[in-house]
Image: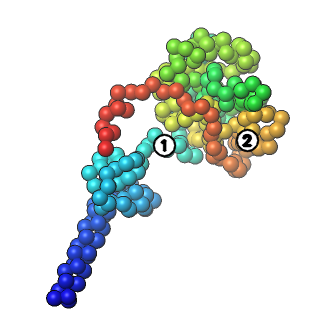
Amino acid sequence: MKHLFLTITAALFLFACGNNADSKTECAEECKKENCEHGSEKCKKECKEKCEHKGDKKSCTKKGDCKPGCKMECCSKDKKDEMMSIGTMNPSLEASMKDISGTEMKMADLAKANGTLIIFSCNTCPFVVGNGDKSEGWENRYNDIAKMAKENEIGFALINSNEAKRDGVDSFDEMIAHAKTANYTDINYLVDANHTVADAFNARTTPHVFLFNANHELVYTGAIDDNVDKKEEVKENWLSDAMTALVAGTEIAKPVTKHMGCSIKRVKKEDDHKGHGH
């Protein structure tokens, strides 16, 4: 009788494990089908890792979980979290934006012989404008960046994508006033209506830097330098070093650095509120 009990117990255990393994396999296959256009080994590995908990008897609690009863978006990687990778083509070359001069400009028109530099910015973020005695902010480097870009035949523009504040501190009139107060010199400051360009770049903060080469391929992204608080205490000039290397045709030592700043103030769309209940 004891032997029979042990046999049944072992069978039940194996059955449970088998179901769990099948659930994981099924989830991984579904994940690959949904998200892996080319069936790469990297993607297959990512899907397997995301589905390791498939078979648990708990509900989906957060993005990345892959559990019974969850919709596929739980298992899928959130594309909103993906940063533009080095080598990516500028996705907004035909995007038209209004400059504070009143001129409509296409992104492609900004490009010069050695490339294009885009910095997402705004009028009030402390990481841009500073915070009294605590921080100078990165804005006091904008004119130096503009001068270097011009000398090295790199097109340069600031882009304001804060659509949620377009009727207030980041309105077109406020952009004009701010550029004057901050003494922007020979800098295009563009309105990104409905944060279309920011969405295409997946730009996250003000500031957020994107440097492209002459072929419109991303070669550097991240922060301007390593010290938002004091210009005189900067030790690593990531952006200027990247521009120097780009023009010289040498390898950029740090093509990606951590972007820091205030979040770009996007307007929530109706679709953001649909289909995400787990």
The residue to which callout 2 is attached is 226
Residue name at image x 16 percent, y 88 percent:
1
Q: Residue furthest right?
A: 232
Residue name at image x 59 percent, y 41 percent:
218
Q: Is residue 55 left or right of residue 47?
A: left
Indicate the quadrant where residue 113 lies.
top right
Residue 150 appears anywhere in the view: no
User: 104 or 208, which is in the foreground?
Assistant: 208
Q: CA distance from mark 2 to mark 1?
A: 23 Å
Depicted 161 relative to depicted 203: above or below:
above
Residue 275 appears anywhere in the view: yes
Alpha-carbon neighbours of circle 1 within 10 Å: few (<14), some, or many (≥20)? Answer: few
Rendering coords of residue 193 (x, y %): 49, 21
Q: Amino acid at mark 1?
A: Asp
Label 1: element kind: helix
Q: Quadrant of the C terminus?
A: top left
Label 2: element kind: loop
Indicate the quadrant where residue 185 lies.
top right
The residue to which callout 1 is attached is 81
Rendering coords of residue 195 (x, y %): 49, 26
Q: Is residue 140 left or right of residue 258?
A: right
User: 269 or 134, which is in the foreground?
Assistant: 134
Indicate the quadrant where residue 128 lies.
top right
Rendering coords of residue 159 (x, y %): 59, 25
Q: Amino acid at mark 2?
A: Asp
Depicted 6 relative to depicted 146: above or below:
below
Depicted 206 relative to depicted 72: above or below:
above
User: 143 or 53, which is in the foreground?
Assistant: 53
